[in-house]
Image (cartoon, grey):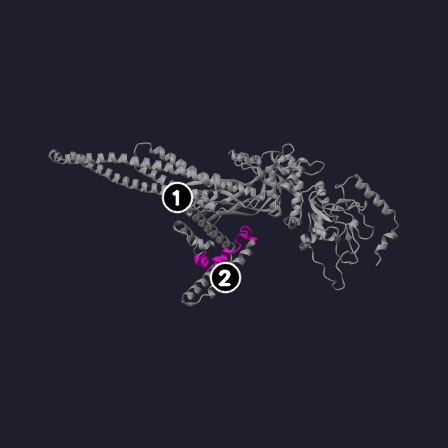
Amino acid sequence: MAVWIQAQQLQGDALHQMQSLYGQHFPIEVRHYLSQWIEGQLWDAVDLENPQEEFKAKRLLESLIQELQKKAEHQVGEDGFLLKIKLGHYATQLKNTYDRCPLELVRCIRHILYTEQRLVREATNSSSPVGGMLDSMSQKYQQINQLFEELRVMTQDTENDLRKLQHNQEYFIIQYQESLRIQAQLSSLASLPPADRQLREPALLSKRATVEAWLTREANTLQKYRLDLAEKHQKTLAMLRKQQTVILDDELIQWKRRQQLAGNGGPAEGGLDVLQSWCEKLAETIWQNRQQIRRAEHLRQQLPIPGPIEDLLTELNGTITDIISALVTSTFIIEKQPPQVLKTQTKFAATVRLLVGGKLNVHMNPPQVKATIISEQQAKALLKNENTRNDSSGEILNNNCVMEYHQTTGTLSAHFRNMSLKRIKRSDRRGAESVTEEKFTILFESQFSVGSNELVFQVKTLSLPVVVIVHGSQDNNATATVLWDNAFAESGRVPFIVPDKVLWSQLCEALNMKYKAEVQSTRGLSEENLVFLAQKAFSSSSSSAEDYRSITMTWSQFNRESLQMRNFTFWQWFDGVMELTKKHLKPHWNDGAILGFVNKHQAQDMLMSKPNGTFLLRFSDSEIGGITIAWVAENPNKAGERMVWNLMPYTTKDFSIRSLADRISDLNHLLYLYPDRPKDEVFSKYYTPPLSKAVDGYVKPQIKQVVPEFTTANADPAVNPTYMDHAASPAVNHPHNYGLYPPMSDPMLDTDGDFDLDDTMDVARHVEELLRRPMESQWSGQQS
């Protein structure tokens, strides 16, 4: 059901909140008459922090105005005439308001839609007759909102009690003044004659006794009122602490954890609108109670009555100040993290937000935020409140930014758009630690006052760990450090401690998350894929997933120590596979055409039971970022014998020359993708269309791949061209066949797998044989 249809069914406070979203900045009539169109647009596709996205926002604004004008034109009749004028006026109004700042329109409408969805969700959950049907998240939201309602009632109750106390105290003061007046009259009797004094004194004494008795009773009553009010405030503050703990220590911490996992490719952490609405309700309730406690303190000072109330009010004042301090400092957060692999001399961005800034009117005097890069040791000292003497570990350009208030969304944030790390100062490394294992963090800090300078806050927040690099070649290892930290960091840790070893099953979750995000695929790593990775990581031959569940993997095994008989680490190999798949193999991976995580012996076993021409694609064991084709065919040197052949691996450089699909198309001996799918059925939609005919007498050259031993004679030059045929691209040092020499086959085919001495000797003997041949015979094939 459309959100707007459900929003119109809201009642009470929810309806009021929904109505308050609209005004001159965006009339509710526009929402009503264009509801379907508004909900059908991709507002979330616009990056509000990127000024270059302004053209998208501009198009949305123009489309909105066109829709309004179109709606106005279709209005007929007397009522339609008035609506036509009104909609036309709104179109002009929106154009004038947002023409110079179209991103603000997107921000406004996104805020409206998010808030409506939240209000509808809360209303639906609260009216549901079956509480058990609600999911845990909805139940938690319901509990939080229910507690807010209890706090609202309690705060209103103490407000009523405070007014009653104030009224009684004012009447007490009047009566006290009356007792003073009586006392003054009694004192004045001394100057009267004795007869007059005896006549008037008894009445005044009686009246004084009555008033003083009343004052004594009322003083005790006032004291009781004060104590009762203080006890109610204690209960309210205890409930406020409980609610604040749930929101800040549970919900906000979970949001930060989701934000950290999003750095590894996890689901987006989600918007902050719900959290901000909760924090604003907290701030409002805390501030109301703080003002009540201050008024109670003022009443006590106005009429001091001996008793424990003074100490109680002092305690309440300290407690409420602690609560609001924790709220303000905890809600100064990083909405958009800086890149965790940070290259020097490269522009980067970040966004800091104060969730309670709008509610506490901090924007009335916009604070400035400063960004500084600090080391892991400096971050530890900062959290221990040790004096770091404003030390930094580098210099960031454009590191100051004023917080801006967006009235349409009620957000107060600072957008650092053009920061750049000019230089970095590294610390002494420990043991085998490399520069790509050293962690830094960006410290954001600010200062502002709340409530007419009543409270001054110094707020600080640290970014997720950052690894600084100076060259792109360091990116791979830096990413490994970030991945490990994001995946295995524990809440509340000392910066930036992570376990040195983790369960293989935990690492599998992190690798799968990263792989799906990098490849942008819903097809993740299967259990068979993960078993293959375990075999590679632990140099094991076991094919049972159960054998690896309790095994731990250390950081050194992950990205310090090279794999057995290789010169690269496990992570470097895995990252190479991701990069290759992301850049060149994504559609084939999504189609399930690439088995990928299969070793050579497994491939041989799988193919030998299939017909000749059956092939599969697997990632190279011996080369980072390589993929090879393995296929089954007859052994040309031994009749009746079949064997599995392996093409030398392709890399990114190869696919930048000719795609995988085209290379598979070129090889006519490849017939079926394992297990039995005709190759054209799988790959034809990715083939490059044939070249057009000659233009102006010129024929375009074409590169095609051949494997000499498997090249079949064909009279059709379009199928078996004689120009620029080559065995493979230079990326893996394959020899080219330009017709100058007969094709060399031995180095192309690797029946046993990786390079070894026998292969090398075969190549050498082949070259010697070619050099002994007369040159004339080499050119004979080129005459046309």
* Viewer-nearest residue: 596 or 782: 596
- Left or right of 566, for residue 358: left
Q: Is residue 397 found inside the magenta-colored segment of the image?
A: no
Up/down of 678 relative to 142, above or below: below
Q: Position of residue 313 (x, y in %)?
A: 36, 35
In the rendering, which numbered label is found on residue 67? 2
Percent of width and height locating residue 563: 69, 37
Number of marks in the image?
2
Mark 1, Cα crowd under 10 Å, few <14 / some 14-19 / many 20+, is few
Q: Amino acid at mark 1?
A: Glu
Marks 1 and 2, how far apart in space? 41 Å
- Determine the residue positioned at 43% across, 48% down: 123
- Looking at the image, which is closer to me, 631 or 148? 631
Q: Which residues are magenta?
A: 25-52
Up the image or down, 261 lies above or below 665; here it is above
The residue shown at (70%, 43%) is 606
Q: Nearer the viewer, residue 674 or 726?
A: 674
Q: Are marks 1 and 2 in contact (CB under 8 Å)?
A: no
Q: Which residue is mark 1?
A: 149
Within 10 Å of the Cα at label 2, are there few (<14), some (14-19), or many (20+) other Cα atoms? Answer: some
Of the numbered discs in the image, which one, if any, rests on residue 643? none
